[in-house]
């Protein structure tokens, strides 16, 4: 029985030494590991919250940039339409001016042709008329008066 008591006492001493060694060394390291894990968890949680906030800010920024891009696209389309309208108006004005110039040139050519024809035909007509009038009228004074009045009307 004494052996059993000494065995129990030895067992109790060994268990006490193990508990003491556990509390002295292992428990401190275990507490430090738990505290470190907790701090890591808190840091990760804060980083996660910050990343979510950054993501939300980026999404808002993307939406604002898309709205701005749409607005700029509309303005570019308006500008392009305005430029196209002005180009069409300029082209129409150039066409109108060209048509006017062509009409004026055509009218000038027609007037020149008429004047050229008149200059070619008038002396012939006048000489023929003088001849016919001399044949009709016997008095030279009557002929000259009649020719003068006719020429005034022709001019």
Image: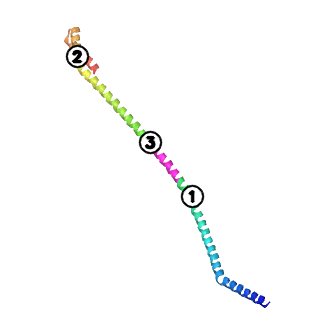
Residues in magenta, as a range: 67-82
Q: Position of residue 47 (x, y in %)?
A: 59, 68
In the picture as drawn, the residue positioned furthest to the left comes out as: 140
Tell me the SS state at disc 2: helix
Q: Secondary structure at mark 3?
A: helix
x and y percentages locating residue 19 in the rendered image:
70, 84
Q: Position of residue 79 (x, y in %)?
A: 46, 46
Q: Is residue 30 left or right of residue 103?
A: right
Q: Is residue 22 above or below residue 63?
A: below
Main SS of the magenta part reads helix
Q: Nearer the viewer, residue 64 or 104?
A: 64
Near-viewer residue (87 or 76): 76
Under circle 1, the secondary element is: helix
Location of mark 1 (residue)? 59
Which is closer to the viewer, label 1 or label 3? 1
**Residue at the location (23% across, 20% down)?**
120
**For this view, does 68 lie left or right of residue 88?**
right
Check the image and report above or below for 122 versus 31: above
What is the spatial separation of the Cα atoms under label 2 and label 1, in whole angstroms? 96 Å
Q: Which label was assigned to residue 124? A: 2
Q: CA distance from mark 1 to mark 3?
A: 37 Å
The quadrant holding residue 109 is top left
- 12, 62: nearer the viewer: 12
Taking the magenta stretch, the answer to whether it contains residue 68 is yes
N-term-proximal mark, 2 vs 1: 1
Residue labelled with disc 3: 84
Examine the rendered structure and indicate whether residue 56 appears above or below residue 95. Answer: below
Crowding around mark 1 (Cα neighbors within 10 Å: few <14, some 14 to 19, many 20+) is few
Check the picture and name the quadrant holding the N terminus.
bottom right
Quarter of image, res 153: top left
């Amino acid at each position: 029985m004494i052996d059993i008591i000494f065995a129990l006492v030895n067992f109790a001493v060994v268990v006490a030494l193990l508990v003491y060694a556990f509390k002295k060394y292992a428990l401190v390291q275990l507490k430090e590991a738990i505290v470190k894990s907790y701090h890591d968890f808190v840091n990760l949680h804060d980083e996660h919250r910050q990343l979510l906030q950054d993501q939300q800010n980026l999404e808002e920024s993307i939406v604002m940039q898309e709205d701005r891009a749409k607005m700029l696209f509309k303005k570019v389309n308006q500008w392009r339409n305005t430029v196209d309208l002005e180009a069409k108006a300029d082209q129409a004005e150039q066409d109108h001016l060209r048509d006017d110039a062509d009409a004026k040139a055509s009218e000038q050519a027609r007037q020149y042709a008429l004047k050229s024809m008149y200059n070619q035909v008038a002396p012939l007509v006048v000489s023929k008329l003088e001849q016919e009038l001399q044949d009709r009228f016997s008095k030279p004074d009557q002929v000259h008066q009649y020719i003068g009045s006719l020429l005034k009307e022709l001019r």
